[in-house]
Amino acid sequence: MIKRIERNRAFWENLILAIMLPGVAGAVNASGFIALGVYTSHTTGNVARIGDELAQHHWDAAGQSAIVVTLFFVGAMTATALVEVAARQARPRYVVALLVEALLLALFALLSIHSERHWRFQRVELEATLCFSMGLQNALVTRLSGAVVRTTH
């Protein structure tokens, strides 16, 4: 029955999803750029950054980029696992994953506010928090929309 409901989602429901979810992703991406100077949704760019840093023998920078790319994928896997577990237990499928994302974004906001003077020391942790959140967002939107609506890449 759940599959039937998802396939029969009304046009206006898809329109709301297409407006709201990219808006959230854009806000997260903008927050990452304003606070850290990086676009946290741009996973392909971060993969390219790994190669660039390795070519220049900047091992630490390559490792930091690899961490955020890995956390993006771990976030996507986490969201998928949370959705699947909820579906098998006949619970609302997206609630827990959305709550995890909301808590991570709140954590980012709190860390950003309280560590403004120390961003250069916590930059990787802050970026990793956003990338994990974007991975969650990406998997949630892909599952929710049937891969019709994408908000991150």
Image (cartoon, rainbow, N blue to C red):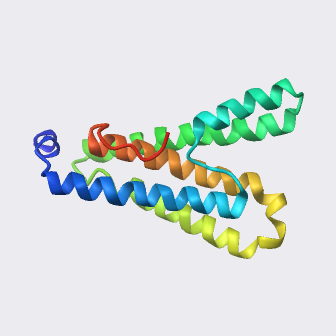
Of the 4 image quadrants, the one containing the N terminus is top left
How many discs mark residues in the rendered view? Answer: 0
Name the residue nearer the viewer: 95 or 130.
Answer: 130
Q: Residue furthest bottom?
A: 114
Q: Residue at x 40, y 40 (%)?
A: 80
Answer yes or no: is residue 100 visible: no
Q: How far across and how far down the image is residue 48, in percent?
A: 68, 30
Q: Residue at x 35, y 60 (%)?
A: 20
Q: In this view, does 109 lie above or below 55?
A: below
What residue is shown at x 66% (from left), y 63% (from top)? 34
Residue 10, x across and y down, in percent: 12, 52
105 to the left or right of 65: left
Q: Nearer the viewer, residue 45 or 104?
A: 45
Q: Quick check: 89 above or below 43?
A: below
Q: Residue at x 68, y 51 (%)?
A: 38
Q: In terms of image quadrants, where is residue 15?
A: bottom left
On screen, residue 117 versus residue 28, left or right, reads: right
Q: In this view, does 92 lie to the left or right of 80?
A: left
Q: Which residue lies furthest to the right in this view?
A: 57
Is residue 61 visible from the viewing direction of this image?
yes
Q: Percent position (x, y) of residue 99?
A: 42, 61
Residue nearer the viewer, 30 or 144: 30
Q: Most extreme residue toward the top, as rendered?
A: 55
Q: Residue 112: horizontal and vertical position, in percent?
A: 69, 69
Which image quarter: residue 52? top right
